[in-house]
Image: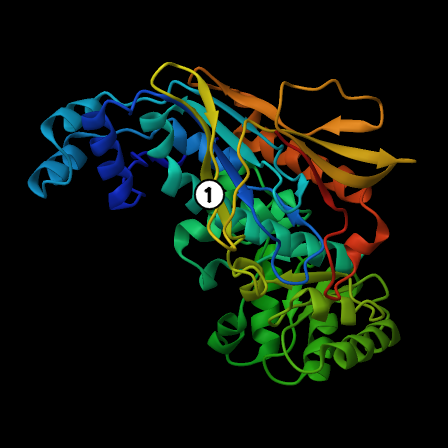
């Protein structure tokens, strides 16, 4: 099973021009090798959201192994005079050798949670900025939306099926992020291959239209896949489709899928008809531009699972998590650590190397506590959130591959269950718990 998302292709050019010019200028100034700490965080959650879900750490760590500059990349930089010859030689040897600390994937986060901290020389750390943000902003946006959807589904399975609505690599990333947030399966085969996520799917409307009539299409599908399949019944008339599906597949038909119309009304009608025809064990899958609000609206309907596409892979109204990556502390010319922070109005950061914990009252999360000092000693009412995932350039393999996705999904389920009940509300509101700071 593959642990990388593009084989052995370098990831270093998924970056911005100015990351390299900063390295070049810092090398010329003699400041590039100063030790530094960069922090990944969000100043705020998307409007009205009660919590976010951290995701992308595993994908980033997989890509970090391939963050290097080959002859093609170096040739481009040289031909376009992006950096000096000295920096070209440095880039040719680049390998990350620092330390990285992070929240576990699937863990809820809140404003100013230190989701990831990169500790290395300035040059080694700053060059990762764009790639790190690109991965985490997308994966976190999808996982956060997916979590709202799985909470709204109330235990009914959700199927990720948004591949055709996203860039091909984003599609696989979205399937992974959705699995972390509780989606049961995906239509995306790349995600199944890379991360061991269960894949699912049967037929689209084109398959029905290919055949001379609906009955012939259903018969062809059952002949190929068996009667424990899912038949799409709304190509023509839903009631007729259900009757044809039951007639062809019999009482062992696993599901009918409805992809159009008033889903609440159609689901109730389909359930009554299936029961009248003796298919009491045949489930109902609904699709058609679902989001968390539509899923919640179907809570009273006899729906067995939800297929979600466009709204999931676009973050359901929040296509980016608005995460930022800021320098928070660095060494001066004498090797002394100096905390730094951005002071621009509306874009402030907080200086210092951070530690974070979640404080609990009677087993329920009460606050996100962010500390900038020597690592404190937490009592039994606190759960530390930041863990080392890269040690002197060596990635902890527990955080990559299929096993990491499974562990992240379990972490997510447990951690979200610990949040106060307000976290599961879809109405706009403040973060489910406050962020408390203990800073210098």
Q: Residue at x 63, y 49 (%)?
A: 185
Residue 79 location in percent, x, y?
Answer: 7, 40
Residue 39 vs residue 70, the one in the foreground: 39
Secondary structure state at the residue bearing disc 1: loop
Residue 313 vs residue 46, the one in the foreground: 46
Identify the residue at the far right of this view: 362
Residue 379 location in percent, x, y?
Answer: 82, 21
Q: Residue at x 9, y 40 (%)?
A: 81
Q: Can residue 156 be seen from the camera position used here?
A: no
Residue 226 vs residue 54, the one in the foreground: 54
Q: How many marks?
A: 1
Residue 332 location in percent, x, y?
Answer: 38, 21
**Quadrant (top left/top right/bottom left/bottom right) for the C terminus:** top right
The quadrant in which residue 101 appears is top right
Along the horizontal axis of the image, is 420 left or right of 440? right
Other-residue count near label 1 (Cα within 10 Å), few / some / many at <14 / 14–19 / ≥20: few
Residue 93 vertical position relative to residue 259 in the rendered view, above or below: above
Along the horizontal axis of the image, is 194 left or right of 229? left
Residue 256 location in percent, x, y?
Answer: 70, 68
From the image, tell me which residue sits under label 1.
Answer: 342
């Amino acid at each position: 099973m593959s642990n990388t998302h593009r084989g052995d292709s370098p990831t270093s050019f998924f970056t911005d021009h100015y990351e390299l010019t900063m390295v070049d200028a810092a090398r010329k100034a003699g400041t590039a090798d100063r030790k530094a700490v960069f922090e990944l965080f969000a100043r705020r959650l998307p409007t009205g959201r009660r919590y976010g879900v951290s995701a992308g750490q595993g994908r980033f760590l997989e890509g970090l192994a391939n963050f290097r500059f080959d002859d093609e990349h170096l040739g481009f930089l040289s031909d376009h005079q992006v950096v000096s010859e000295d920096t070209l030689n440095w880039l040719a040897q680049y390998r990350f050798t620092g330390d990285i600390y992070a929240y576990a994937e699937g863990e809820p986060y809140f404003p100013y949670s230190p989701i990831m901290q990169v500790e290395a020389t300035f040059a080694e750390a700053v060059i990762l900025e764009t790639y790190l943000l690109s991965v985490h902003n997308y994966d976190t946006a999808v996982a956060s939306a997916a979590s709202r959807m799985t909470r709204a589904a109330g235990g009914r399975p959700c199927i990720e099926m948004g591949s055709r609505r996203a860039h091909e690599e984003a599609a696989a990333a979205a399937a992974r992020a959705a699995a972390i947030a509780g989606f049961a399966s995906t239509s995306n085969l790349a995600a199944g291959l890379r991360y061991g996520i269960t894949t699912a799917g049967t037929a689209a409307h084109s398959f029905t239209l290919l055949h001379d009539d609906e009955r012939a299409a259903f018969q062809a599908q059952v002949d190929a896949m068996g009667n424990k399949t899912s038949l799409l019944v709304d190509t023509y008339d839903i009631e007729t489709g259900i009757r044809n599906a039951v007639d062809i597949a019999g009482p062992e038909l696993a599901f009918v899928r409805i992809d159009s119309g008033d889903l609440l009304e159609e689901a109730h009608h389909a359930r009554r008809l299936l029961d009248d025809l003796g298919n009491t064990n045949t489930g109902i899958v609904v699709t058609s531009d679902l989001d968390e609000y539509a899923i919640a609206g179907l809570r009273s309907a006899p729906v067995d699972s939800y297929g979600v596409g466009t709204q999931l892979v676009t973050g359901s109204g929040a296509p980016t998590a608005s995460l930022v990556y800021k320098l928070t502390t660095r060494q001066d010319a004498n090797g002394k650590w100096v905390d730094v922070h951005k002071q621009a109005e509306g874009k402030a950061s907080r200086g210092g190397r951070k530690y974070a914990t979640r404080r609990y009252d009677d087993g329920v999360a009460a606050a996100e506590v962010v500390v900038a000092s020597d690592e404190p000693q937490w009592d039994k009412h606190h759960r530390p959130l930041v863990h080392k995932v890269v040690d002197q350039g060596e990635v902890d393999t527990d955080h990559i591959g299929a096993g990491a996705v499974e562990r992240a999904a379990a972490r997510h389920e447990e951690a979200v269950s610990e949040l106060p009940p307000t976290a599961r509300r879809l109405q706009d509101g403040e973060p489910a718990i406050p962020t408390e700071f203990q800073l210098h």
